[in-house]
Image (cartoon, rainbow, N blue to C red):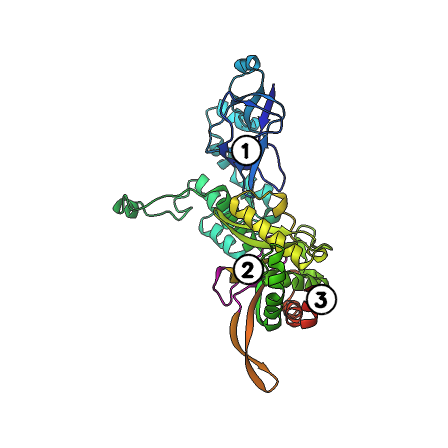
Amino acid sequence: MKEIKFVDIGEGITEGHLHKWLVKDGDTVKEDQSLAQIETDKAVVNVPSPISGTIKLLIKEDQNVKVGDLLAYVGEPAELSAAGAPQAVQKQQPASQLNAVAAGIAPETQRASKPEAAASATQQKEVLATPSVRKLARELNIDISIVTGTGPSGRVLENDVRSYAMKSGHPSAMPKFSEVTEEKHAGEIERIPLSQTRKAIAKNMELSWTIPRASHMDIANATSLSSMVQKEKEKMQKLGIKLTFLPFIIKAVVEALKEYPRFNASYDHEKGEIIQKKYYNIGLAAEAPDGLKVIVIKNADRKSISQIAKEVRELGDKVRNQTISIEEMRDSTFTITNIGSLGGGFLSVPMINYPEVAILGVHLVREMPVVQGDMVKVGKILPLSLTFDHRVVDGADAVLFCNAVIRYIEDPNFLEMLG
C-alpha cells in the first residue's frame, strides 16, 4: 500500500487547494494515472498514482492542503480496509509554554509578563521595514522588532504588523468593513474568498511593493515594425502561426538587455549583490480566467520570430485552458506586460515581477503625427513604460535602456534581419 501525499514541488509553494478528484473512492487506478488536480499559487498540478491498485480517498474536494498532507492510499482492498484516516499532527509546544499550561497560565500571558526581556533580546535584530510600516507599528504601540516579517529577506510588511496586532487583541488592528453597513445592506453584499491564484497575486504584489521603484516612459515610431509584421503575416499564416508585434519587441528587448545587462538581473538584499543573468528568459504577463499569470519564453535570444510567435500562442492557450505547468512559468529574467493586447491604454506604471529588476509595459499602437525631416506624416506610435528597481539601476540607465529598445524597434535593417 502506498501513501499519496501533496509533495513539495518547489518554487516556495507550501500549500494548495484540492480543486478536483479525477477518480472516485474505491476506483481501480493505474500507475502514473492522474488522480487529482491541486491548484497552487503558480498553476494547477496533477497528482499521479505511484502504483496500480485500488484508491481510498481521505480528503474531500474544495479543501486546502499543505505540503506533506496525506491525500489518499493506493493498494489492495484488504490493505485499504485496515487503513484509517490520518491523524492530525499537533505542533509541539516549547517546554516553557508546557510548564506554563501545567501551572494554569496561558502562554500569551507568560510571554507578556516579561516585556523587558523580550525587548532586550531583540534589540540587536536588524528590522527591514518601510517608514510607513514603522509608523503603523508605532500607532498600534507594537515593538516592530518582535514582528515576524514575511517579505523578502524577512522584511516586515504592513500585513505582518496588522496580523500581529490582531493576535494581540488590538481593537484597531485591521480596517474592518462596518458591521452596521453590512447589516443595513443584508442580502446585497457577497463575501468572496480569494482563490489560490488571487492570493498568490496579492502576495506577489506586496513583495513587488517592497522594491524602491521608479518609472520611465517614452514612445517608439513603430511604422517600420508595422510594415514588417504585415509583410511576414501571410507567410506565417501558412505555417499556422499568428504573427503580432510582440515577437519583434521581445527580440528588441533581448538585444537591449545585452547592451545593459543590469536590467537582466535580480537583487540579493542580504548580501548586497546584484545577481546578473547571462541567459534571456522573457516573461510575458498573460490573463487567465482566475487571474494574471506570467509565461516564460526560455532562451529567447536563441529563437527565431516564428518560434517565439508559436510559443507565445501555445503558452497563452495553456494559461486560458488552465493546463500550464509550473516549469513554463518559472525562471524569467525580465518581464514584458502587453497592455496593448487588451485594446486600450496609452501609458501605465506596471508592477515589477519580483525579484526581477525591471518590467516593460507595451501599449496600444496608434496612428499619430510623426515628424520626418521637414515633413509631418501619419505614423504608427508605440508607447512604452519601464518600471525599474532604483537600488540596481538609475534613471539615466533606464533612459539608455529604453533608447536601445526603441532603436531596435525603429531600425528597418534589424527588423529585416529578424524577418
Which quadrant of the structure image shows residue 91?
A: top right
Give x and y (percent) for residue 281: 67, 53
User: Residue lying farthest left?
Assistant: 184
Which quadrant of the structure image shows residue 353?
A: bottom right
N-terminal label among 2 and 3: 2
Dot 1: within a 10 Å radius of its alpha carbon, few (fewer than 14), some, or many (20 or more) residues? Answer: some
Pair 2/3: label in front = 3
Considering the image in quadrants, where does the C terminus appear?
Answer: bottom right
Which residue is disc 3 drawn over?
A: 417
In the image, 77 versus 12, the foreground residue is 77
Give x and y (percent) for residue 63: 47, 32
Q: Secondary structure at mark 2?
A: strand
Residue 353: say if magenta.
yes
Give x and y (percent) for residue 412: 67, 72
Q: Secondary structure at mark 1?
A: strand
Name the kind of residue labelled 1 in the image. Lys
Which residue is disc 1 drawn over?
A: 66
- In the rendered image, the vertical position of residue 91 relative to residue 306, given as above or below: above
Name the kind of residue labelled 2 in the image. Asn
Which contiguous range is marked in magenta? 342-365
N-terminal label among 1 and 2: 1
Q: Residue at x 51, y 44 (%)?
A: 197
- Cα distance between the residues tagged 1 and 3: 50 Å
Which residue is disc 2 drawn over?
A: 338
In the image, 3 versus 165, the foreground residue is 3
Considering the image in quadrants, where does the N terminus appear?
Answer: top right
- In the rendered image, the vertical position of residue 374 relative to residue 399, given as above or below: below
User: Residue lying farthest front?
Assistant: 238
Q: Are marks 1 and 2 in contact (CB under 8 Å)?
A: no
N-terminal label among 1 and 3: 1
Pair 1/3: label in front = 3
Name the kind of residue labelled 3 in the image. Met
